[in-house]
């Protein structure tokens, strides 16, 4: 059987073009998939941490308004609870990551979850505010959360330059509102536990004095 050289060259070129096209399409799909997951990760970080700076500012505003009143001592204690409330938020975020890892908790899967995601690592680092030495410095928790608050400011800036769609900005704002509510809820939980502990401590002291 005699093969025409021109036919062979034509078939070879067609197959080469087809291979290059298929490879390009596959790379684009991979990049698209990576981009989608990166966007979801970004939204999760905004949902958990970006609302904390506003909650922090609100608490300090209330403390300033209630200065030299009978509630001054209690409100100042709430300021000290801010880092622990932030650590509680980080604990919930860590719980979400663990749920995403289920049922494969291997080292390789954990490394894959955090690979090229420095913001995710930074978010998990907020768990360290459970440590008393860090928990006594509320300003550090504010500095930590400002990284995620800047993501919102970045989108606002890009919106002014018309670099992102209104739908994306609307989504970010809705998630930011939920983040504020989440951080307020975590602060409320820590405040509730604090006052329960305070009441139990006073009751115990009262019973000891009564016994004596």
Image: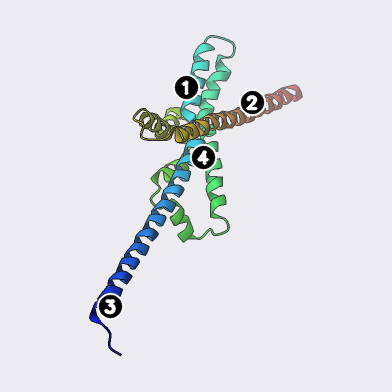
* Mark 3 or mark 4: whose residue is earlier in sequence: 3
Looking at the image, which is closer to me, 32 or 117?
32
* Mark 1 or mark 2: whose residue is earlier in sequence: 1
Q: Which residue is mark 4?
A: 90
Relative to residue 201, is residue 171 drawn left or right?
left
Place of residue 195 in the rendered image (x, y in percent of width and height, measured from the top left) = 64, 26
Q: Residue at x 54, y 51 (%)?
A: 100
* Direction left: furthest residue: 5
Q: Which residue is mark 2?
A: 195
Position of 102 relative to 136 (above/below)? below
Position of 190 relative to 116 (above/below)? above
Place of residue 17 in the rendered image (x, y in percent of width and height, measured from the top left) = 31, 66
* Mark 1 or mark 3: whose residue is earlier in sequence: 3
* Mark 3 or mark 2: whose residue is earlier in sequence: 3
Q: Which residue is mark 3?
A: 7
> Quick one: SS at disc 3?
helix
Mark 1 vs 2: CB contact within 8 A: no
Real-space Cα separation, disc 2 to disc 4, in angstroms: 22 Å
Real-space Cα separation, disc 4 to disc 1, in angstroms: 19 Å
Mark 2 vs 4: CB contact within 8 A: no
Q: Nearer the viewer, mark 1 or mark 2?
A: 1
Position of 18 relative to 113 (above/below)? below
Q: Which residue is mark 1?
A: 57
Real-space Cα separation, disc 3 to disc 2, in angstroms: 86 Å
> Quick one: SS at disc 2?
helix
Real-space Cα separation, disc 3 to disc 4, in angstroms: 64 Å
Mark 1 vs 3: CB contact within 8 A: no
* Mark 4 or mark 1: whose residue is earlier in sequence: 1
* Mark 2 or mark 4: whose residue is earlier in sequence: 4
């Amino acid at each position: 059987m005699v093969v025409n050289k021109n036919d062979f060259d034509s078939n070879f070129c067609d197959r080469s073009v087809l291979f290059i096209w298929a490879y390009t399409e596959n790379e684009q799909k991979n990049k698209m998939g990576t981009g989608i997951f990166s966007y979801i990760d970004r939204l999760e970080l905004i949902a958990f941490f970006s609302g904390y700076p506003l909650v922090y500012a609100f608490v300090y505003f209330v403390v300033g308004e209630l200065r030299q009143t009978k509630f001054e001592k209690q409100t100042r204690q709430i300021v000290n609870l801010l880092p622990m409330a932030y650590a509680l938020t980080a604990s919930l975020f860590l719980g979400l990551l663990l749920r995403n890892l289920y049922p494969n908790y291997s080292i390789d899967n954990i490394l894959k979850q955090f690979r090229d995601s420095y913001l995710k690592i930074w978010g998990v680092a907020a768990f360290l505010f459970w440590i008393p030495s860090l928990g006594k410095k509320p300003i550090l928790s504010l500095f930590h959360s400002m990284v995620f608050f800047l993501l919102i400011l970045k989108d606002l800036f890009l919106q002014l330059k018309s670099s992102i769609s209104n739908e994306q900005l609307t989504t970010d704002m809705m998630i930011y509102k939920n983040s504020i509510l989440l951080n307020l809820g975590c602060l409320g939980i820590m405040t509730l536990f604090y006052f329960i502990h305070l009441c139990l401590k006073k009751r115990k002291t009262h019973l000891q004095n009564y016994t004596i």
